Image: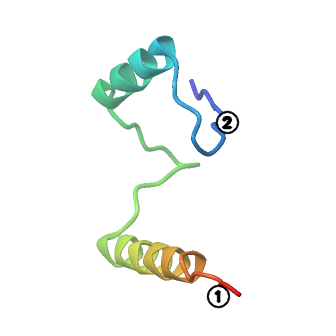
Amino acid sequence: MIKTFIIESGQKLTEEQLKEVEEAKKSPIYFDEDCKELSPAMMKAVVQRNRKKKAENSIAEPVI
């Protein structure tokens, strides 16, 4: 089952949400035909893409 929480910047999780996250960390990940495990090469590409996106988003705007 998938649960989605929308957390605004600076908002803190409730105790109940924190417990759910901790329990989810203990659960195994199951891959199937619709959601296959990434190959090492694909995982490397995803990590590089995410780093690039993070760097692009962290560029500070000049202060005038």
Quarter that holds the C terminus: bottom right
The disc placed on residue 33 is none
Q: How many labels were placed on the picture? A: 2
Q: Around disc 1, counting alpha carbons within 10 Å, would you say few (fewer than 14), some (14 to 19), or many (20 or more)? A: few
* Nearer the observer, 20 or 57: 57
Q: How is the image coloured?
A: rainbow
* Nearer the observer, 54 or 33: 54
The disc placed on residue 6 is 2
Q: Name which of mark 2 and mark 1 comes first in the sequence.
A: 2
Which residue of the protein is positioned furthest toward the top in this rendering?
16
Position of 15 compared to 41: left or right?
Answer: right
As helix, strand or loop, the secondary structure at mark 1 comes to: loop
Position of 57 compared to 21: left or right?
Answer: right
Mark in the foreground, 2 or 1: 1
Residue 31: name its quadrant.
top left
Quarter that holds the N terminus: top right
> Vertical placement of 44 versus 20: above or below?
below
Q: Around disc 2, counting alpha carbons within 10 Å, would you say few (fewer than 14), some (14 to 19), or many (20 or more)? A: few
Q: Residue at x 48, y 11 (%)?
A: 16
Residue marked by disc 1: 62
> Vertical placement of 39 versus 62: above or below?
above
Q: Amino acid at mark 2?
A: Ile
Which residue of the protein is positioned furthest toward the right in this rendering?
64
Q: Residue at x 67, y 36 (%)?
A: 6
Residue 43, percent from left and from top: 37, 70
Q: Residue at x 30, y 72 (%)?
A: 40
* Nearer the observer, 37 or 9: 9
Residue 47: name its quadrant.
bottom left
Residue 29, percent from left and from top: 37, 37
* Nearer the observer, 54 or 36: 54
Instruction: Quote the CA–CA distance across marks 2 and 1.
Output: 29 Å
Residue 58, percent from left and from top: 54, 76
